[in-house]
Amino acid sequence: MGSFTKYLGASLGWSFGGPIGAIIGFVLGSVIDGFSEGGIKNEGTYRIPNQGRKRVNRTQSGDFEMSLLILSAVVIKADGKVDKRELSYVRNHFTQMYGTTRANHAFKLFNGIIKNNNISTRQVCLQIRQQMAHASRLQLLHYLFNIAKSDGFVTESEINMIHKIAGYLNISNYDFESIKAMFYSGINNAYKVLEINKSVTDLEVKKAYRKLVKKHHPDKLQHLGKEHLKGAEEKFRQIQKAYEDIKKERGM
């Protein structure tokens, strides 16, 4: 048990408070036998950060990880069933990012979160929104689409849930549609990725690409640690591919 509590204590900042901390505490108390909360406050003492309060604690790798676990569970359950392919994707993704030991700890928590039917998606997203920078929230959304498509297709209920999460996270509809389009092929989706329509000029295509590169550049996630840069680089490559497809179509 010591190794597990050590895992939890590493790289965790603001996610030990608020609704996310309450969910972690509930899962630890009800799923992991012999766990002693120790330094974690009782569930009833967690509070949502005040509206308008500026971010004080920088998002760390563990904060991002806990946010991923909870929102992944919400999306997986959106269509009313828990698909084994989606669960496998989460496990494999975490193994690739963190290694086997940390991934096993994370999945132990994840199994408890999946069984929790009292998660307030809005409250969780409010905490994330108030503490996490915009670039990191965009990366969360990209990951959620990865999960939704891991069983071969994205259902309407999953899209609706991710769209709701995007709204709670204060992610614009343009950003939502751009990230969504990364998971579909075709030239029309390439334009959606760059957040433009087919009527724009070649110069506007280039400007849109430069704007998106700046918004989604992996360097914006350096503070989360190298384990999260691979996902950011994947998203960056999808943007570059969309731009190359449009250039080829237009003969630019």
Image (cartoon, helix red, strand yellow):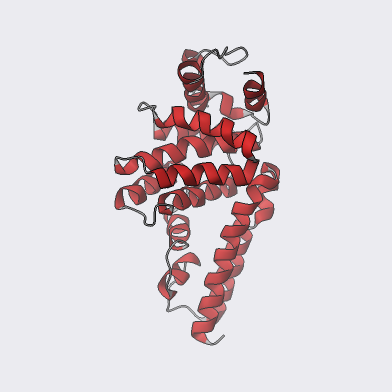
Q: Is residue 148 visible in the rendered structure shown here?
A: yes
In the image: residue 95, left or right of residue 116: right
Residue located at (41% from left, 32% from top) = 114
Q: Where's residue 109, x and y in %?
A: 51, 29
Image x and y of residue 88, in percent: 47, 44
Above or below residue 127? Residue 236 is: below
Q: In front: 181, or 98?
A: 98
Asked if residue 50 shows in the view, the reply is no
Q: Quadrant of the N terminus?
A: top right
36 to the left or right of 182: right
**Rendering quarter of residue 8:** top right
Residue 16 image point, x, y percent = 58, 24
Q: Nearer the viewer, residue 44 or 1?
A: 1
The C terminus: image quadrant? bottom right
User: From the viewer's perspective, is 102 left or right of 29?
Assistant: right
The residue lying at 32 percent from left, 52 percent from top is: 155
Q: Name the residue located 59 percent from the left edge and 43 percent from the top edge.
A: 95
User: Number of labelled discs?
Assistant: 0
In-front residue for pair 187/2: 2
Give the residue drawn at x 50%, y 52%: 142
- The answer to which of 171 and 224 lies nearer the viewer is 224
User: Where's residue 199, x and y in %?
Assistant: 42, 79
Kindly give the residue lying farthest to the bottom in the view shown.
Answer: 251
The vertical placement of 193 against 227, above or below, is below
Q: Height in image: 82 above or below 243?
A: above
